Amino acid sequence: MRTSTPQTPRAAHAAACLIGALLISAGVPGRAAARVAQDPGTPASLTGVLRRALDVHPSIQAAAAASDAARAGLQVARAAWLPQFGVEGGVTRFQEPMLVAPLHRFDPTAVPDFDPTLMRGTLGASWTVFDGGRRGADVSRARALDGAGRAERRQVEAELLAGTADAYLAVLSGREIVAAQERREAALEAEVARARRLVAEGAAAPLESLRAEAEWAAVRAEGEAARQGLELSVATLARTLDLPVDDVRRAAF
């Protein structure tokens, strides 16, 4: 008795990628810096898993930092068009009183101002009227870098969502495959017991029992491979979500 092993549903993978695209279009990545309210536990739905991945994965944080830096560079380039103001001041303290006011003419009857403290201040303003197009070129370059940074961030977010959805579905399908394999193993174990009983009673040839045992051994090997694959999928999803493996293993997806 042989049953087919279930495979990963392609329709579910397409649906997961579609949900990821909808989350991007709905602005979820823009709010990913805020912690998901339904945490601290393991997210139980695909939407929760994707939100957590966007919130904690270092690739998103690095892309966001690069995008913010490019946006800041654009603001700096635009600021070059504005007038520039400068203020400078200083205070000098002398041990003895010092002449602190300018003398415009020599007048023996006028006593100049003396003070041990001299304070000076200057205020300046400048505005470049023409620079040969340098500021415009700087703004264009900064705008291009800003657009590239935002595009890179969206690409990183899309790739992370697709990879997280694949890992999530791999865990779901792996659980189904392991459950199916366990049912197959139980059924073939019963078949082996029946074949052995028939051989012992003389109602079947020994070859029947050997055939059943060989098939049972093959199914047990497939089951062990399925369990190892499930553990690998769980570890991959746990690493993506920055969660303990045991939490993901016990999560009720």
Image (cartoon, helix red, strand yellow):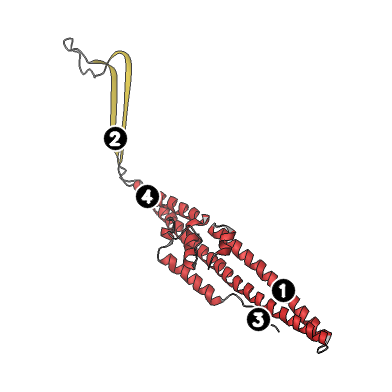
Q: Amino acid at mark 4?
A: Gln
Decide which of 245, 58 is in the foreground and name it.
Answer: 245
**Front: mark 2 or 3:** 3
In the image, 113: left or right of 36? left
Residue 122: x and y in percent read: 29, 30
Mark toward the start of the polypeptide (3 vs 1): 3
Provide the secondary structure element on which disc 3 rests.
loop
Mark toward the start of the polypeptide (2 vs 3): 3
Say which residue label 1 marks.
220
Provide the secondary structure element on which disc 2 rests.
strand
Decide which of 2, 81 is in the foreground and name it.
Answer: 2
Q: Residue furthest bottom?
A: 203
The residue that appears at 37% across and 51% down in the rendered structure is 136
Mark toward the start of the polypeptide (4 vs 1): 4
The local crowd at label 2, few if under 14, some if 14 to 19, many if 20 or more residues have their Cα within 10 Å, is few
Gap in Å between the C-alphas at discs 2 and 4?
Answer: 23 Å
With respect to residue 203, does 226 lie above or below?
above
Residue 235: x and y in percent read: 60, 61
Q: Amino acid at mark 3?
A: Ser
The residue that appears at 74% across and 78% down in the rendered structure is 216
Provide the secondary structure element on which disc 1 rests.
helix
Say which residue label 4 marks.
75
The residue that appears at 59% across and 60% down in the rendered structure is 246
Gap in Å between the C-alphas at discs 2 and 3?
Answer: 83 Å
Gap in Å between the C-alphas at discs 1 and 2?
Answer: 85 Å
Say which residue label 3 marks.
4
The local crowd at label 4, few if under 14, some if 14 to 19, many if 20 or more residues have their Cα within 10 Å, is some
Mark toward the start of the polypeptide (4 vs 3): 3
Q: Amino acid at mark 1?
A: Arg
Gap in Å between the C-alphas at discs 4 and 3?
Answer: 61 Å
The local crowd at label 1, few if under 14, some if 14 to 19, many if 20 or more residues have their Cα within 10 Å, is some
**Front: mark 4 or 3:** 3
